[in-house]
């Protein structure tokens, strides 16, 4: 019989895998959205998006959606 903590760990890994797939889709959408015909604009947007802090809100939204 599995202990409660082992079950929780297994469930959290499954949820993490599910969120990882969702976040990969978010990342793809972000990369597509910042493309521009002007290469310099794409470079600037990539720098700003890559600076961090732009993925917490999508992660929380996906977590709530999946709950």
Image (tube, rainbow, N blue to C red):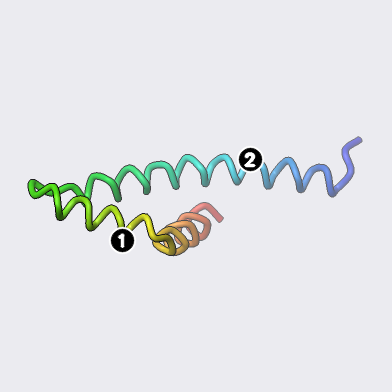
Q: Secondary structure at mark 2?
A: helix
Query: Picture coordinates of residue 58 (x, y %)?
Result: 42, 58
Residue extending farthest top? 1
Which corner quadrant holds the C terminus?
A: bottom right
Instruction: List x then y, in percent, for residue 42.
Output: 19, 51
Name the side, left or right, on which 28 lies relative to 65.
Answer: left
Question: Toward which corner of the image does residue 1 lie, by quadrant?
Answer: top right
Q: Secondary structure at mark 1?
A: helix
| Residue at 54% across, 42% down | 18
The relative height of residue 28 versus residue 51 in the rendered view (above or below) is: above
Q: Residue furthest left?
A: 37
The disc, 2 or 1, on the residue closer to the chain's N-terminal end is 2
Image side of residue 35 versus residue 56, left or right:
left
Toward the viewer: 6 or 1?
6
Q: Residue at x 13, y 49 (%)?
A: 36
What residue is shown with label 1?
48
Residue sitting at 13 percent across and 47 percent down? 39
The residue indicated by pointer 2 is 14
Residue 25 drawn at (x, y percent): 38, 42
What residue is rendered at 67% in x and 42% in y? Answer: 13
The quadrant in which residue 47 appears is bottom left
Q: Neighbour class for label 1 at 10 Å: few (<14), some, many (≥20)?
A: few
């Amino acid at each position: 019989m599995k202990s409660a903590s082992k079950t929780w760990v297994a469930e959290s890994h499954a949820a993490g895998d599910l969120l990882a797939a969702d976040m990969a889709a978010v990342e793809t959408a972000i990369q597509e959205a910042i493309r521009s015909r002007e290469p310099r604009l794409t470079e600037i947007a990539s720098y700003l998006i890559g600076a961090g802090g732009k993925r917490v809100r999508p992660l929380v939204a996906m977590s709530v959606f999946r709950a």
